[in-house]
Each structure stands twice: as structure tokens, then as C-alpha cells.
Image (spheres, helix red, strand yellow):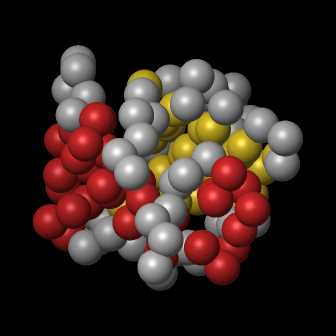
């Protein structure tokens, strides 16, 4: 099933620090990313309506350099390529799934079933 997440760039309060922020699903999910010293993107936080916020401390689970560059390029565009963003976000969530509530990512469809 191909879900329309309708990703959008957003900002957060200064207390919620990250390099990049995305929202999706009409503001039900917010995803925060950081860029590592070697320019790889990692997931630092994700929050879900009805569940709360997951802080993710594992900066070793990053996108590879090619995918990181693609995500950075997409986040710099005025109009996001929804398909490309969805693929990369799902990849990051999959890499970090042991740190995120299973029922939340399943409810919001942010991981493909294996």
C-alpha cells in the first residue's frame, strides 16, 4: 500500500534541537534529524500523537552517504519529493525501530512490513 504521508518542513522550539525537522500525516508525527560529523543523517527524535516522543541516542544508525546527501538535497527544496522523502524516512525508522514504539510506527504506517 502506498500511503500519502504529506511530509512538510517545519521548525521546533529551541528546547527541541535538531538540524532538520519534518512533520507528516497532518501534524500527527514529527521527525527530527541530525547530521553527523561525517555528513550522515541520523534520526534523533520522533513524536507521535497519542504516544509521545522517542529520543533516539544511537547516532551510529545513519543513512549511508548517498542517501544522506539525497535527504539533505530534498530538505533544501521548496517542494519536497514525497516519494523520495518517504523512502528515506522509512529507511531511518527501520534502522532505529528497536528504539521506537512498534504500535506507533505500525499505526502511522511508517515502516513497511517485512
Q: Nearer the viewer, residue 62 or 47?
A: 47
Name the residue at the top extreme.
78
Front residue of 103 and 100: 103
Q: How many marks?
A: 0
Question: Which residue: 38% across, 66% down?
Answer: 91
Residue in view at x 25 percent, y 42 percent: 83
Q: Decide: is 33 above or below 30.
A: below
Residue occupying the far front of the picture: 1
Residue positioned 26% across, 29% down in the render: 80
Is residue 31 rendered to the left or right of residue 36?
right
Decide if residue 65 is in sight here: yes
Q: Can residue 92 be seen?
A: no
* Residue 79 in the image, given as x and y percentages of width and height: 23, 21
Q: x, y (%) of residue 84?
A: 23, 46
User: Where in the figure is residue 15, as x and y percent of width and height?
Assistant: 74, 36
Residue at 39%, 51% (x, y): give it: 1
Find residue 44 and report its image quarter.
bottom right
Q: Position of residue 69 (x, y in %)?
A: 18, 55
**Left or right: 70, with 107 as reference point:** left
Above or below for 63 versus 20:
below
Q: Is residue 59 left or right of residue 51?
A: left
Q: Quadrant of residue 36?
A: bottom left
Amino acid at each position: 500500500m502506498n500511503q500519502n504521508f504529506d511530509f512538510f518542513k517545519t521548525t521546533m522550539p529551541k528546547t527541541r534541537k535538531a538540524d532538520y525537522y519534518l512533520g507528516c500525516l497532518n501534524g500527527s508525527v514529527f521527525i527530527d534529524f541530525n547530521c553527523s560529523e561525517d555528513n550522515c543523517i541520523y534520526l534523533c527524535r520522533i513524536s507521535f500523537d497519542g504516544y509521545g516522543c522517542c529520543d533516539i541516542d544511537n547516532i551510529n544508525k545513519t543513512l549511508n552517504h548517498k542517501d544522506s546527501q539525497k535527504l539533505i538535497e530534498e530538505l533544501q527544496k521548496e517542494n519536497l519529493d514525497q516519494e523520495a522523502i518517504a523512502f528515506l524516512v522509512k529507511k531511518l525508522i527501520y534502522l532505529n525501530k528497536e528504539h521506537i514504539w512498534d504500535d506507533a510506527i505500525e499505526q502511522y504506517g511508517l515502516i513497511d512490513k517485512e
